[in-house]
Image: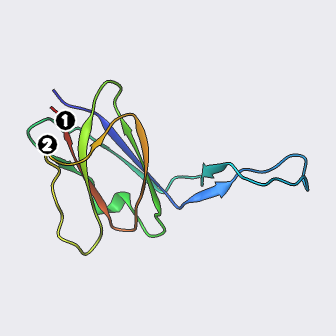
């Protein structure tokens, strides 16, 4: 079996507008800054890890949204640019559903379907 994992990179977040304008707000709702910078789909299985392309995190990337196929769980490793890439294994941390990760330009993500 394989799991579908969608990756979407963003330049950051932005505070949602407060209506009416000028109304005091002691806190804010933050939204992903649109338009996304890049996207990629991975299809790891439980034996072989799949890694994203560094092009999925172009200059200005600060956030990576990870969407894991419903009913699936993957193990992951974040690999910052300039560091030796680590492939995800069954011992790596787990992700399922939708997760937002801190990410940077040229970084990659390695995923493997959890057993």
Badge 1 element: loop
* Label 2 packing within 10 angstroms: few (<14), some (14-19), many (20+): some
Q: Viewer-proximal residue, 24 or 80? A: 24
Q: In the orientation shown, which residue stands out farthest toward the left? A: 47
Secondary structure, mark 2, is loop
Q: Earlier in the sequence, mark 1 or mark 2?
A: 2
Question: In screen coordinates, is 115 left or right of 7?
Answer: left
Q: Image quadrant for the N terminus?
A: top left
Residue 12: image x %, image y %?
A: 55, 60
Separation of disc 1 and disc 2 at Cα? Answer: 6 Å
Residue 64 place in picture, x, y as percent: 42, 53
| Closer to us: 40 or 70 | 70
Instruction: Single out the residue that lies furthest toward the top.
Output: 71
- Residue for badge 1: 114
Q: Quadrant of residue 13?
A: bottom right
Determine the residue positioned at 27% across, 53% down. 52
Residue that extends furthest to the bottom in the rendered view of this protein: 82
Q: Name the image quarter holding the C terminus.
A: top left
Q: Is residue 104 left or right of residue 87?
A: right
Q: Where does label 2 land, which residue? A: 90
Report how many numbered discs are placed on residues in the image: 2
Q: Quadrant of residue 57?
A: bottom left
Indicate the position of residue 72 as horizontal and vertical percent values.
Answer: 28, 29
């Amino acid at each position: 079996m394989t799991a579908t994992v969608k990756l979407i990179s963003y330049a950051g977040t932005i505070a949602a507008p407060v209506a009416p304008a000028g109304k005091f707000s002691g806190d804010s709702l933050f939204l992903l800054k649109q338009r996304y910078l890049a996207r990629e789909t991975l299809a790891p299985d439980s034996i072989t890890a799949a890694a994203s392309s560094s092009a999925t995190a172009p200059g200005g990337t600060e956030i990576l949204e990870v969407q894991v196929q419903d009913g699936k769980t993957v193990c992951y490793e974040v690999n910052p640019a300039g560091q030796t890439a680590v492939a995800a294994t069954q011992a790596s941390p787990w992700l399922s559903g939708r997760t937002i990760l801190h990410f940077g330009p040229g970084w990659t993500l390695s995923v493997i379907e959890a057993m």
